[in-house]
Every structure is written in structure tokens, then in C-alpha cells.
């Protein structure tokens, strides 16, 4: 079994997240996706908004299931009272799924900083890594060569300009976001008046 691990703040989840998971299924033959909601690194105390994020990721998982891609929501990182590190999440998931192949899905911007991540040498032993890159390959060639020596990294060209930051700004300004997020998540945001200020 091949399980993809996709972590993020998901604030809010959007069509880019959905597209990444579906492309991973197509190119990497993923059998299941674990959507892990990470803590805001600038806010260690839980808030009601964390519950909203978890509910919206649940709606994203439902969208994936409609495409017959099993998806599970993990709130393990949200429960931590200390900053969350990807290597700790992978250690936890490795105990939960000892006999499956794990692949971590990351964006190219995160991958650029990968050598600065906590215990990144261990991380590449715990899982494979799929990098969704949005910039020309020559800009990350030196990092690509380094990581190919210590882990199995797959680069996937992915052009999706949608970002959660832009969506929050659009909502706050009253601009429509229906083309950027699944309809169920849009309805949830409207019903709970999220991102209005």
C-alpha cells in the first residue's frame, strides 16, 4: 500500500491542494492520502479556528473520496502543545503504518529549505518525497543533486497559482473565490463568516 502524507495549515483548503493529491495518485500511484493539519508556528495555543480548519480539511477529504481516492484527516499535530516538526509526524505515522510505503508531498518552496528542517537526514529515511515544483528546474539544481544522494525524491511539475493567503485576502475584500475552493468549503466559510477581517 502506498500512502501520501500531505501536511499544511490548510487555512483554508483549496483547489490547489485537491489537484496536488489527484496528481500524486496519477503519477505516484497513491492508494490513500493522509491530510495532516499543522499548527500555526506563531500561535501555540489552540483556538476555535483550529476546529474550523479541521472541519474544512474534513470537507477536502470528502472531495477526494468522491474521486475514489481514500483520504484521512490527522489532527495529531494540532494536539501538540509545542511546535510541530515534520520528522515527528513521520515518526508517528511510521508507527501507525509500519508496513506501507509513505511519500511526503511538499511544495517546491518548502523543499528549497529542506536541508534546514529538523532532522531532515532521518526524514528521508522514513519516507519518500514528492516535490511539486513551480519554478524552472535550474533554480533548484544544487539542492536536487544533494537530496538525490540521501533519499528518493520525485519532482513533479505543477503549475497552480492558488494560495490560501490570496484566498483569505479575497474573502476579506469581498472578492469571489468560488473558482479557487471546493463548493462545500466555500459554503462552510460563508456559514461561519470566516476570514472577514
Image: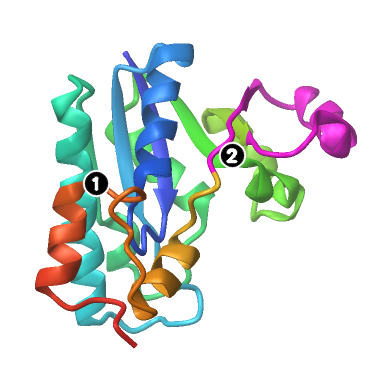
Q: Which mark lies nearer to you, 2 or 1?
A: 1
Disc with the residue nearer the chain's start (2 vs 1): 2
> Which quadrant is the N terminus positioned in?
top left
Q: Residue furthest left?
A: 191
Residue at the spot x=55%, y=40% of the render? 106
- 19 relative to 134 in the view: left or right: left
* SS at badge 1: loop
Along the line of sight, which residue is nearer the eye, 83 or 173? 173
* The C terminus: image quadrant: bottom left
* Quarter location, residue 98: top left
Q: Is residue 171 magenta?
A: no
Alpha carbons under labels 2 and 1: distance apart: 32 Å
Q: Mark 1 points at which residue?
A: 182
For this view, does 193 lie left or right of residue 153? left
Compared to residue 89, the image places residue 147 above or below, namely above
Q: Is residue 105 visible?
A: yes
Q: Residue at position x 20%, y 58% from top?
A: 186
Asked whether residue 101 is in view, the answer is no
* 68 and 36: which is toward the camera: 68
Q: So how many labels did they put on this image? A: 2
Q: Is residue 110 left or right of residue 4?
A: right
**Image quarter for residue 72?**
top left
Provide the residue designation for mark 2. Answer: 123
Checking the image for residue 132, the label placed there is none
Magenta residues?
133-160
Amino acid at each position: 500500500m502506498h500512502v501520501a502524507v500531505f501536511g499544511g495549515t490548510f487555512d483554508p483548503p483549496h483547489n490547489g491542494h485537491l489537484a496536488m493529491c489527484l496528481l500524486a495518485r496519477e503519477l505516484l500511484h497513491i492508494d490513500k492520502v493522509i491530510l495532516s493539519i499543522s499548527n500555526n508556528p506563531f500561535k501555540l495555543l489552540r483556538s476555535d479556528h483550529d476546529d474550523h480548519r479541521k472541519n474544512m480539511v474534513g470537507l477536502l477529504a470528502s472531495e477526494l473520496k468522491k474521486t475514489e481516492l481514500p483520504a484521512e484527516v490527522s489532527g495529531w499535530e494540532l494536539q501538540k502543545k509545542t511546535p510541530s516538526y515534520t520528522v515527528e509526524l513521520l515518526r508517528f505515522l511510521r508507527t501507525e503504518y509500519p508496513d506501507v510505503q509513505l511519500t511526503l508531498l511538499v511544495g517546491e518552496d518548502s523543499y528549497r529549505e529542506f536541508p534546514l528542517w529538523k532532522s531532515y537526514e532521518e526524514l528521508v529515511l522514513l519516507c519518500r518525497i514528492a516535490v511539486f515544483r513551480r519554478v524552472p528546474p535550474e533554480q533548484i539544481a544544487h539542492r536536487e543533486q544533494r537530496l538525490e544522494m540521501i533519499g528518493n525524491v520525485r519532482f513533479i511539475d505543477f503549475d497552480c497559482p492558488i494560495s490560501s493567503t490570496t484566498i483569505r485576502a479575497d474573502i476579506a475584500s469581498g472578492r469571489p473565490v468560488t473558482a479557487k475552493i471546493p463548493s462545500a468549503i466555500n459554503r462552510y466559510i460563508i456559514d461561519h463568516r470566516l476570514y472577514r477581517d
